[in-house]
């Protein structure tokens, strides 16, 4: 019986070695398949980037045409920003005064799409700063993202404006107490600020820039509602005066 038990153990070892060998072979084959898929995925990504670059060139004159029309609409970008559910919260009262001079907004990918993009705010001559362009650029590197921004040349007596948190009549949206233009500043806590402000860049690039008319129209709708409320208030005051007489 002892001999039989020993044979059983040796049989189990042989089976285990066979199973382990088959497992190794299966894993090796699976790795080969995975490597093949990775190669295809890389080729697909390159093709997608080629298509993106091609259509960026096609979009450029259309964006230019859109900008020409936008420039003829008073306070277009100010209205679009304010009506955006996230960007609107970033503008102080003082920022809104500056945004009235915002002539156009541009988002431009690098020639090699995967290497980064830039966001440029073009301003008409204004009493706040000397710059006609404020640009923030994101460059994607192997070691991380490099972020550069225009150092604003404020005019004498001007600087990073800070508004006071308050509530806007109508939608009761609280406004920021830190200027949007801190987004361009070189702060001592740069890494923290860039991590937070990356989200702003994504929203501008992927949402606002893609279809600003949607937010502009929303802003005009909000304005008309406020006008209606004012008209209602005036009607009530007139009615009260008539009753008093």
Image (cartoon, helix red, strand yellow):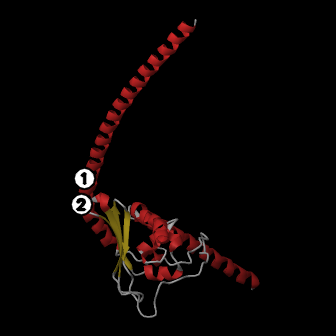
Residue 220 shows in this picture:
no
Q: Which mark is residue 50?
A: 1
Q: Label 1, secondary structure: give it.
A: helix
Q: Position of residue 175 (x, y in %)?
A: 57, 74
The mark lying in front, picked from 1 and 2, is 1
Q: Is residue 167 left or right of residue 48?
A: right
The residue at 31%/57% (across/down) is 114
Say whether disc 1 or disc 2 marks the residue closer to the N-terminus: 1
Q: Residue furthest right?
A: 244
Mark 2 neighbour density, 10 Å: few (under 14) some (14–19) many (20 or more): few
| Residue 216 quadrant | bottom left
Q: Position of residue 52 (x, y in %)?
A: 28, 54
Q: Residue furthest top?
A: 1
The residue nearer to you, when weighing 70 against 147, is 147
Q: Position of residue 92 (x, y in %)?
A: 53, 78
Q: Is residue 193 left or right of residue 124?
A: right
Residue 63 shows in this picture:
yes
**Image position of 26 with respect to 226: above or below:** above
Separation of residues labelled 1 and 2 (CA atoms) = 11 Å
* Residue designated by label 2: 57
The residue at 49%/67% (across/down) is 196
The residue nearer to you, when weighing 175 against 145, is 145
Mark 1 neighbour density, 10 Å: few (under 14) some (14–19) many (20 or more): some
The residue nearer to you, when weighing 156 against 76, is 156
Q: Residue furthest bottom?
A: 156
Q: Position of residue 128 (x, y in %)?
A: 42, 87
So how many labels did they put on this image?
Answer: 2
The residue at 49%/69% (across/down) is 192
| Residue 177 quadrant | bottom right
Q: Which mark is residue 239?
A: none
Q: Is residue 16 left or right of residue 171?
A: left
């Amino acid at each position: 019986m002892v001999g039989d038990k020993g044979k059983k153990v040796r049989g189990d070892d042989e089976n285990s070695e066979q199973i382990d060998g088959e497992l190794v072979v299966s894993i090796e084959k699976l790795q080969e398949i995975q490597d093949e898929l990775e190669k295809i995925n890389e080729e697909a990504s390159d093709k997608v980037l080629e298509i993106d670059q091609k259509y960026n060139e096609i979009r450029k004159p259309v964006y230019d045409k859109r900008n020409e029309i936008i420039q003829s609409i008073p306070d277009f970008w100010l209205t679009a920003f304010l009506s955006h559910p996230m960007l609107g919260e970033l503008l102080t009262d003082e920022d809104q005064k500056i945004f009235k001079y915002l002539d156009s907004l541009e988002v431009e990918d690098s020639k090699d799409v995967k290497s980064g993009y830039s966001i440029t705010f073009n301003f008409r001559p204004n009493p706040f700063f000397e710059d006609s362009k404020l640009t923030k650029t994101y460059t994607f590197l192997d070691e991380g993202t490099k972020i550069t921004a225009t150092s604003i040349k404020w005019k004498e007596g001007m600087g990073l404006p800070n508004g006071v948190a308050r509530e806007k009549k109508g939608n009761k949206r609280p406004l920021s107490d830190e200027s949007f233009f801190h987004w361009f500043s070189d702060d001592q806590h740069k890494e923290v600020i860039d991590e937070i402000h990356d989200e702003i860049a994504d929203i501008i690039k992927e949402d606002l820039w893609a279809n600003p008319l949607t937010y502009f129209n929303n802003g005009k709708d909000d304005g008309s509602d406020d006008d209606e409320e004012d008209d209602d208030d005036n009607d009530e005051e007139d009615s009260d005066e008539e009753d008093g007489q």
